[in-house]
Image: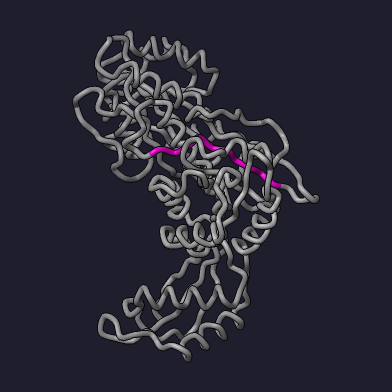
Amino acid sequence: MSNKFTVALIGSPNVGKSSIFNRIVGKKISIIDNEPGVTRDRIYENTSWLGVDFSIIDTGGIELDKKPFQEQIRVQAQIAIKEADVIVFVVDGKVGLNTDDKYIAKLLFKSQKPVILAVNKIDSGEQIYNINEFYALGFKDIIPVSGIHGIGIGDLLDKVVEYFPKENNESEVDLDTERIVFSIIGRPNVGKSSLLNKLIKSERSIVSNIEGTTRDCINSSFFVDNKEYLAIDTAGIKKSGQIYENIDKYALLRAMRAIEDSNICLLVIDGNRGLVEQDKHVLSYAFEKKKAVIIVVNKWDLVKKEQNTVDEFTKHLRKELKFVPYAPIIYVSALTGSRVDKIFELLNTVNEAYKTKISTSLLNKVIRDAQMMNEAPDFNGGRLKITYVQQVGIMPPKFALFVNNPSFMHFSYQRYLENRLRDSFNLDGTPIDFVLRKK
């Protein structure tokens, strides 16, 4: 399930935001340096406290002086403020209150978001009185902390969690509900928004020929044949080297979150232009997150039809997208509406596969027969023997294989076992996850 809440760390340069960020997430992700302004872009990480999952954002330091990249840093921080449910305003307890702190405080009051003031670098009991002058900023929650030593971090997180809504927000995506949750992903200008509008029969998304029109994710809940769907349209994803504008980084992060929030990802390809390297790059995000996948070839009405055109295009896609051989392919035109309704049939089929549960007896019969038909090859000094198999998860289907030695598993034999499972059960569109356990 995706994280429901977001916390942003905001403050001036060199107050220790990155130290607090690393302490909260439990690993060194943000760079820590005495040089002000090391963190420029927003850095996201998932974490939890008291059983509550949330995202935390580290941001660059905001200051009044016109220094290099300051305008970009301020934009990034403002985006983080907009995204956050709770803001942790970090100040330097050793330096004391300054004009940058006062400027940031005004920005945060305008946001009307809950703000917790974390007075950092309170490394000992003698320094506790350093927090007193920060009461002048007007925030009621002031907590002394030390990002370097971990002092007060638990108290800070306790206060953060108190501000999280107790009820589920209706706009949140819940993967456990009966509705089918899917995102529409792809590089810019392949017709994602047009496809969404055809699916929901509404002009919810702006449709334009200008790349990058969709900047944010748009959730649309609707019913078809008494079945509920939640569609998430996303901004076009560009390669990292092509992301020049701050807003493009924002679009990429939102698109990544949309993929994480989905059960199924519809990768939209421009059929008129054909498959390009960036399509593979976009699909890799969904693959890494182990999401079910449907490949939608759009603009098929613009393609000059010849004999075997579909067969040749499909053969080319299968060759180039070998890492998702299980993904069904459908050819549509969002402009004319041709075959768009057929996408719902695929969504239903793939959703069932993504959540499928297989009985242990059937699983063991299939794997036993597979071993009898084709023994595992000698690998790493031994031959793999599978004594028992059991499904241990769904979304995607996850299977535990109890074996004599996990190191004996060759990737080609694992692929063979996956194919046998796909031949025996409906697993179209979904990845399969294997866990090897020594008997």
Residue 52 appears in the picture as rendered? no
The residue segment tinted magenta is 229-238
Choose between 330 and 52: the one closer to the eye: 330
Quarter holding the C terminus is: bottom left
Q: Residue at x 76, y 51 (%)?
A: 227
Q: Is residue 27 above or below residue 250?
A: below
User: Is residue 415 positioned above or below 395 on the image?
Assistant: below
User: Residue lying furthest bottom in this view?
Assistant: 372
Where's residue 174, x and y in %? 62, 47
Q: Is residue 56 left or right of residue 29?
A: right
What is the x, y in percent for residue 277? 38, 48
Q: Quick one: 427 or 38, which is closer to the camera?
A: 427
**Residue 293: within the magenta?**
no
Q: Give the mark count.
A: 0
Instruction: Tell me which residue sits at (50%, 83%) in the image.
Output: 388
Which colour scheme appears in the figure? one colour
Outermost residue, front side: 306
Residue 354 appears in the rendering: yes
| Above or below 169: residue 391 | below
Q: Which image quadrant for residue 72?
A: top left
Depth check: give the residue in front, 206 or 352.
206
371 horizontally vs 341: left or right: left
